[in-house]
Image: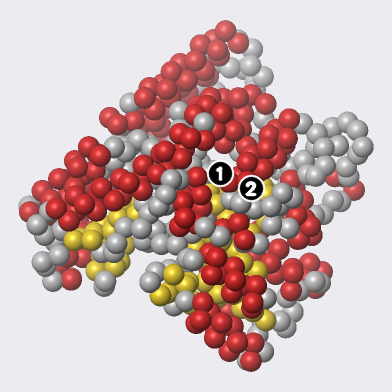
Amino acid sequence: MAEKGIRTQDWAAFRAEAQRMLEAALDQMQQAAERPWQPVPEDIDARYAVTAEARGPQQTVDRIIADVLPYHGGNTHPRFWGWVQGSGLASDLISSVAAAAVNANMGGRDHGANYMERAVVDWTRRKMDLPEGASGLLVTGTSQATVIAFQAARLRVLKDLRKQGQGEARLTAYAGEGVHNATLKAVELLGIGSDNLRKVPLTDGRMDCVALARMVAEDKAAGALPFLVVGTAGSVDLGLFDDLNALADAAAALGLWLHVDGAFGAWTRIAAEPYRSLSDGIGRADSIALDFHKWMYVGYDCGMALLRNEAEHRAAFAARPSYLEGAERGLAGGEPWFCDYGIDLSRGNRALKVWTALETYGEAAFSEAITGNCALAAFMAAEVEAQPYMALGAPVVSNVCVFTARSDLEPEAQSMLNAHIAQTLQESGEAVFSTTRAGGRVMLRAAITNHRSREADVQAAIAAVAREAAG
Ligand SMILES: *Cc1c(COP(=O)(O)O)cnc(C)c1O
């Protein structure tokens, strides 16, 4: 059945195909454990080539089921722990269908979806201990949230920035060694320059505030304008946390804006102890960047920028040319508009998937899953240490476990073996570890942000590593 024109004519046929697609999507999620990542077929480019011929919904759904669903990134599988990737929720199937039906543009105006985004921002603000009146918006992810936060921070010290640019001022920012590349990118994008991002040494895995004060003083003496310190709640390599209370004290004393990169680690806020206290003090930040698509398991993409001071947030982005003027009543009402808080004018409906997840499962279920992921990382560490030649690369602090399969080999041989094992287990579909460098060696790394993982998955994966290491 081919369609003529874009407007659906045969709704009965379309309905049947849409329902078939939904059933296949439900199967995919229900059977996530049987569907690991697999290499894409040689002819994938040919399969996906846009023919732009009207094939109709039936053929298109057939092709999606045959050629799209199998070649996913694997992060829905219970033994996927590579990089830091979220596992996706069944509730996303419900919210994405509803979101498609209303096709909301969340840039502004007076319609329900914006009220829902405000509710989601407010819930998150409370979880992050920010005061009432703090503002936020949903964005693609922590990378974009970081740019938004840094721009507001920069405006605090350069009042005419929006009109005149940064000019001769040399701004400097500070972050611990091991800060995520998103901070570097934001500094580059905003024209601050990566040389002006100072890497502060860590002591016991946390930014050394004495070194921070010394570096700020040196930069000031050299004519720079220190303006920003970036704390990390959950470092990407090892899951480490800065002492955010100490950083808030230091930022106040040094006159710096405190931004917290909490991409995944901010969610320890809703975990049980001992994990919750890792992010103590996060509510003292001027801004927080975090993701829902990692450790809140919500489908891609979904992050948030939170700013303590709404006026500073709005001052950095608000701009309303005449064709976007608001109104007292009607669709052009509904102030404030989200376009005044960030980069995008047209915005998709990310709020619905967060809201649907929280309303479907409840906050307590997320707390349990996050706490459980940390417990599972600790369990993995114990399994590693129980193996004769395996060894941890660093202590497990939160949800990240870094280890070597053969600590008895020379560093170079270890590196080669660990990299080989990561690839082999990815290709066999048994488990996905990524790799990182620790102690001068390439090591296997698991970042557990996966609500489908169980102890049996960890046992099976470590057994597979042991088999390959012996092999
Ligand atoms: C993933 C990550 C980022 C970048 O976030 P995106 O959502 O991928 O843009 C920044 N910081 C940390 C610590 C991360 O883990």
Does the image show residue 426? no
In the rendered structure, find residue 370 and report the number of the disc placed on it: none
Look at the numbered discs 1 and 2 and tell me whether their residues touch, using CB distance below 8 Å: no
Place of residue 200 in the rendered image (x, y in percent of width and height, measured from the top left): 48, 77
Q: Position of residue 149 (x, y in %)?
A: 65, 60
The secondary element bearing badge 1 is classed as loop
Q: CB of residue at label 1: within 8 Å of ligand 1? A: no
The residue lying at 60 percent from left, 25 percent from top is: 98
92 versus 471 height, above or below = above
Give the alpha-carbon distance from disc 1 to disc 2, as whole Å.
16 Å
> Relative to residue 59, is residue 169 drawn left or right?
right
Chain-order first, disc 1 or disc 2: 2
Q: Confirm or reject: label 2 Cβ below 8 Å from ligand 1.
A: no
Q: Which mark is residue 302?
A: 1
Would you name the residue on which mark 2 appears?
Answer: 125
The residue furthest bottom is 221
Disc 2 crowd rating (10 Å Cα; few below 14, some 14-19, many 20+) is: many
Q: Residue furthest front?
A: 273
Q: Label 1 is placed on what type of residue? A: Cys
